[in-house]
Image: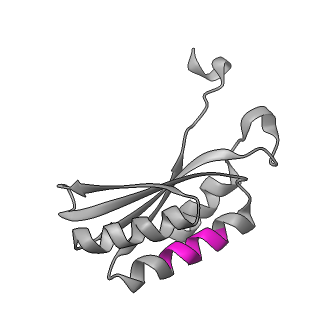
Amino acid sequence: MARKTVEQMAVNNIETPDGDPEVEQSMEFFLYFPTEWDAYVTKSCLMNLQFDASVHYSESSDNWLCLAKKEIKPTKDRFLELKNFFERLARAKNGNYDGWGTTVVEDEADVA
């Protein structure tokens, strides 16, 4: 299945606390860079935009991960804006935007 379709399905299925789409949710965004310097420059940029950001070496990809976290309202329009922003930001430093993640809250009825 194409990545665009998978991302759209994930956005469509996000459930926010109490089922309210206006409630902010903790989201993580993954950007990979070939050099530590590029990852740290990106981290600085993201911190100026009120993201909580950290940099770690990723042995599995042999790249530097810049992990950005922020509480946002998970709407389709907001995800599209962020996706475009992160792709441009990563590309400017020879990096790649590798998507987003969030905590999944399991329904107790489904856990049995």
**Would residue 15 appear left or right of 39 to someone viewing this image?**
right
**Would residue 59 appear left or right of 64 to someone viewing this image?**
left
Which quadrant of the figure has residue 42?
Answer: bottom left
Q: Where, quadrant-wise, is the C terminus in this rendering? A: top right
Residue in view at x 82 percent, y 41 percent: 20
Residue in view at x 80 percent, y 37 percent: 19
**Would residue 31 appear left or right of 46 to someone viewing this image?**
left
Q: Can residue 46 be seen by looking at this rendering?
A: yes
Residue in view at x 57 percent, y 62 percent: 7
Magenta residues, dominant SS class = helix
- x and y percent of residue 91 in the render? 40, 83
> Is residue 1 shown above or below 10?
below
- x and y percent of residue 90 in the render? 41, 76
Residue in view at x 32 percent, y 60 percent: 65
Q: Nearer the viewer, residue 35 or 44?
A: 44
Which quadrant of the figure has residue 83?
Answer: bottom right
Q: Is residue 81 magenta?
A: yes
- Magenta residues, start to end: 80-87
Q: Nearer the viewer, residue 46 or 105?
A: 46
